[in-house]
């Protein structure tokens, strides 16, 4: 059996680094989320050639890409800035960073919060305004703010479906037509049980305020679906006034 040819790896200090069977490669950094499959593929190819692997998951080889306190202090001594405005990490990290800057005689150290807009020059840095901040993501073709709850609603609908109750009322708030129930993603007997619960609720709430009526019907419909099916679908009540 012929021996596998060595792997060549480009390196700034030695462009002719070669890996052979019996060598060991140390993966000293953590895998950035999203790159798991690509890194695993490289590791599998190395292992197939008889090359050993050391990773931060099974050996104490992790190397941080962030500076330690002494390294930050050295940077401040070199640069001698007039302002420190820490923006990396959580609040406790930023506060500690600003305190270190003051210890190193930086004239001004400010700890910003998300959304704060600063003017750094000319003159002394000042806080000017607050701007919208936070994470956003693409939902199809639309930008959606973090916490909008759309993904949570879709997961709930995937599990227990969507239930819609439609009511028709006149100008005095009286029921003017039989209610209708539409269930998406649920067995037919569930709709039948919900319709009966809605009708019973309407008989007991003939003089209710429209908003109160809608909420009473929503609760009754959701409870009936749960009693009949064991699941609580997302439930909406539509009021049509004539």
Image: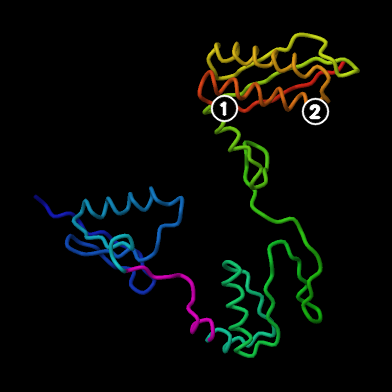
Asked whether residue 71 is drawn in magenta, I would say yes
Q: Quadrant of residue 25?
A: bottom left
- Asked if the stretch drawn in magenta spans residue 28, the answer is no
- Left or right of 34 in this view: 11: left
**Colour mapping used in the image:** rainbow
Q: Position of residue 62 (x, y in %)?
A: 36, 68
Asked if the residue at tag 2 contacts the one at tag 1, i.e. Cβ–Cβ closer than 8 Å, the answer is: no
Q: Residues within 10 Å of mark 2 (few under 14, many from 20)?
A: few
| Pick the front one: 11 or 163 | 163
Q: In the picture provided, is 7 more to the left or to the right than 96? A: left
Position of residue 157 relative to residue 38, above or below, is above
Foreground residue, 203 or 134? 203
Callout 1: helix, strand or loop?
loop
Please provide percent x and percent y for residue 208: 82, 23
Closer-to-camera residue (172/160): 172
Return the residue at label 1. Answer: 232
Residue at x 59% of width, y 13% of height? 193
User: Which residue extends farthest left?
Assistant: 1
Residue linked to disc 2: 211
Res 151 quadrant in image: top right
- The mark nearer the N terminus, 1 or 2, is 2
Q: Residue at x 67, y 20 (%)?
A: 164
Picture mark count: 2
SS assignment at label 2 = helix
Q: Position of residue 189 (x, y in %)?
A: 55, 11
For the residues labelled 1 and 2, the Cα–Cα distance comes to 21 Å
Magenta residues, as a range? Answer: 61-73
Q: Quarter of the image containing the C terminus?
A: top right
Task: Identify the residue at the far front of this view.
Answer: 204
């Amino acid at each position: 059996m012929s021996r596998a040819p060595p792997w060549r790896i480009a390196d700034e200090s030695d462009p002719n680094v070669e890996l052979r069977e019996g060598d060991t490669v140390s993966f000293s950094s953590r895998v950035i989320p999203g790159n798991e499959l690509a890194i695993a593929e490289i590791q599998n190819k190395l292992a197939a050639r008889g090359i050993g692997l050391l990773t931060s998951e099974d050996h104490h080889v992790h190397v941080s890409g962030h500076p330690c306190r002494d390294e930050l202090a050295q940077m401040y001594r070199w640069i001698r800035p007039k302002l420190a405005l820490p923006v990396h990490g959580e609040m406790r990290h930023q506060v500690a960073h600003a305190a270190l800057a003051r210890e190193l005689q930086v004239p001004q150290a400010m700890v910003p919060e998300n959304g704060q807009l600063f003017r750094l020059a000319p003159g002394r840095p000042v806080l000017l305004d607050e701007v919208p901040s936070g994470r956003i993501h693409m939902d199809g073709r639309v930008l959606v703010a973090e916490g909008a709850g759309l993904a949570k609603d879709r997961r709930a609908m995937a599990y227990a479906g969507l239930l819609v109750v439609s009511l028709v009322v006149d100008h005095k708030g009286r029921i003017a037509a039989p209610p209708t129930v539409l269930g998406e993603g649920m067995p037919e007997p569930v709709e039948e049980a919900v319709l009966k619960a809605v009708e019973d609720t309407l008989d007991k709430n003939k003089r209710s305020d429209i908003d109160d009526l809608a909420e009473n019907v929503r609760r009754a419909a959701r409870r009936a679906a749960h009693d009949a099916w064991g699941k609580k679908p997302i439930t909406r009540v539509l009021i049509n006034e004539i």
